[in-house]
Image: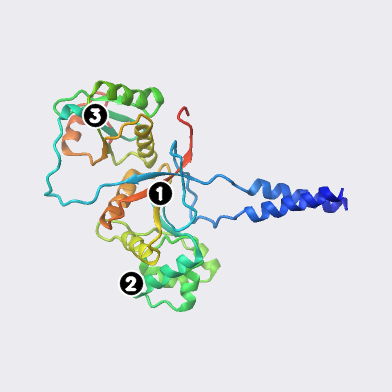
Amino acid sequence: MTPMVDMGFLLVAFFMIITQFAPPDPVQITVPASTAMAKLPEANLITIMVSKEGIIYIKIDGKRNLKGLGQVINNGWDLGLTADEIDVFSNLPGIGIPVSGLKEYLRLSDSERKGIIMTGIPAGKDHNELGDWISYAMLSNPMASVVIKGDRLTPYPVIKRIMDTLQDIEVNTFSLITDTKSKTD
Amino acid sequence: MTPLVDLAFLLLTFFMLTTTFNKPQVMEIKIPEKRDANAVQPKINEKHVLSLVLGGSNRIYWYIGLTEPSVQETDYSHEGLRGMLLEQNRVIDRMVVLIKPGDKSTYENLVIVLDELEITNIKRYALVEIEEEDKNILSNYAGGAEI
């Protein structure tokens, strides 16, 4: 009996360590399937998330990377964030609001913040903050790679705007996150 | 002792179920550098060009060249898109595929087309916008095109 219990706990410990509770995404996304086999890199990702309504979010993995970005945007956009607000920023699961509302947003309490409806990062032709976000994120972490996680039903014009934005800031290589399927599916 | 073992196995089951070993797959995309509008574009024989217009409601319209081509329609199934690509790739020497997604098409439509081009081993393709010429060609399509 005792050896079995030992083994049981060993397995429990193993799975506890292996499991990583993925930080919740700001929005539910069903990605399209493809036969692409390349794996998503472990770290240093700048993820552009697009919901099926076409709302754009940006997600940076790693608290340290996000904190670095917080400092860069604070200087870049002259937001006047305090150290506390940058700390709050480094815990955000994703950003989906215009920069003009960012300071207000960071001042809210956690529960108030959950109630805010994300309107998305502006990426229009006249007013494009997405390009600046990506540029700042690349500046704060030059190792980062850009990935797009789009919902399968996202209208193409939104994807086109994102790709044009990436082309404008000379990010010419990026990846699309897809689900697995076999060639015969 | 037994309740302890029960608990241990309960935890074990929980962690086994929550663990995901497979990581998401990615499709790598390389887009050309931005060039100014006046730059000279390479010219190709229109007979080698397959235009693939992605419309709404998961419809695809395709035609060869731009001078009064006959527009045909297909879908995203194996017999449809993949069969057509394989067939045309055999018939047309040095085929170039121009993907022209319409405003009503979705992200999934684009991903499927890129994936099928990869599967059928067609290396020469480009993602371009729908031009006025394409709209004229499609407006004559008997089946009615949604783009």
Badge 2 amino acid: Gly
Residue under disc 1 on the same chain as residue under disc 2:
yes
Residue B80 against residue B124 in the figure, above or below: above
Instruction: Name the residue nearer the viewer: B123 or A35.
Output: B123
Q: Which mark is nearer the camera, 1 or 2?
A: 2
Instruction: Name the residue nearer the viewer: B20 or A50.
Output: B20
Residue A149 is situated, as x and y percent measured from the top left of the image, at 43, 49
Which of the chains bears the disc numbered 2?
Answer: A
Residue A17 is situated, as x and y percent measured from the top left of the image, at 65, 56
Residue A67 is situated, as x and y percent measured from the top left of the image, at 46, 69
Residue drawn at x 71%, y 55% is A13
Which of the chains bears the disc numbered 3?
Answer: B
Q: Is residue A138 left or right of residue A16?
A: left
- Disc 2 on helix, strand or loop? helix
Look at mark 1 in the image and give the residue it sits on.
Answer: A53
Badge 1 amino acid: Glu
Look at mark 2 in the image and give the residue it sits on.
Answer: A76
Residue drawn at x 33%, y 43% is A156
What crowding class fits label 3: few (fewer than 14 Cα within 10 Å), some (14-19), or many (20 or more)? Answer: many
Alpha carbon separation for disc pair 1 and 2: 29 Å
